[in-house]
Amino acid sequence: MTATLESVRSRSFTFILGSPRGGGNTETLARYAAEGLPSDTAAGWLSLSELPLPARPSGPLLDGPERVLLDATLDSTDIVLASPLHWYSVSAATKLYLDYWARWGGLPDVGFRERMRGKNLWAVTAYARGDDTDTEPLTGMLRRTADYLGMNWRGALLARAHGEGDLEADPSALARAAEFFDLTD
């Protein structure tokens, strides 16, 4: 039997937290989902509110938050964007992080696009009002981003949660979270 590259290579997840505050429903949902990862799977957590990026990416590659985010993005096999739904899309901090993907793609010595090919992109989002159809602009943008870079779009974990504790009161959301990271394929 021949092992596939995926079964030989260990998985490394980076969770990018895009909420302006820590411990919100989206982060809570992502952490519930992460509990379902195999114990030998590496998982790192980065908060965009703790790693602020300059609003206008330009000039040479910066040390500090930009370098931390770039290295984590490139070193991961799986990137999970955990962003609450803001005006039918990702949060402003998450959008800025994705703007840096375009910047990194234009830097000659980074090889960003080539190194992103084949990685997995996931999303986790909680929304306060409406239903899952309100998340279609968010999931569509992320799916197209994955397609553009040759990444694998692995889907979005969605849950409606307005206030603190709403997720814990929704057993179906927690069950979906426990099963979200299907690593069998």
Image (tube, grey):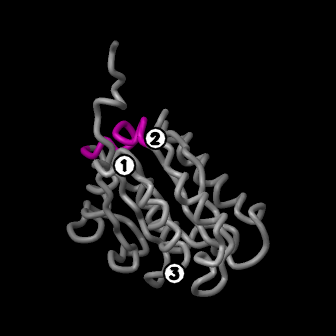
Q: Are marks 2 and 3 in contact (CB under 8 Å)?
A: no
Number of residue marks: 3
- Report the residue marked by disc 2: 183
N-terminal-most mark, 3 or 1: 3
Q: 184 and 131: which one is in front?
A: 184
N-terminal-most mark, 2 or 3: 3
Residue 177 appears at what percent x and percent y? 55, 60
Q: Which amino acid, by three-letter code, is at mark 3?
A: Gly
Q: Secondary structure at mark 3?
A: loop
- Report the residue marked by disc 1: 38
Q: Residue 34 vs residue 84: left or right?
A: left
Q: Residue 2 vs residue 152: left or right?
A: left
| Label 3 to label 1: alpha-carbon separation | 24 Å
Q: 183 and 81: which one is in front?
A: 183
Q: Which quadrant would residue 9 be assigned to in this image?
A: top left
Category of crowding for the residue at label 1, using alpha-carbon neighbours closer than 10 angstroms: few (below 14), some (14–19), many (at least 20): few
| Label 1 to label 2: alpha-carbon separation | 9 Å
| Label 2 to label 3: alpha-carbon separation | 26 Å
Look at the picture and state if 157 lies above or below 20.
Answer: above
Q: 29 and 66: which one is in front?
A: 29
Q: Which quadrant would residue 162 be assigned to in this image?
A: bottom right
- Report the residue marked by disc 3: 24
Read off the magenta span. 109-119
Q: Which amino acid, by three-letter code, is at mark 1?
A: Pro
Q: Are marks 1 and 2 in contact (CB under 8 Å)?
A: yes
Q: Residue 133 vs residue 43: left or right?
A: right
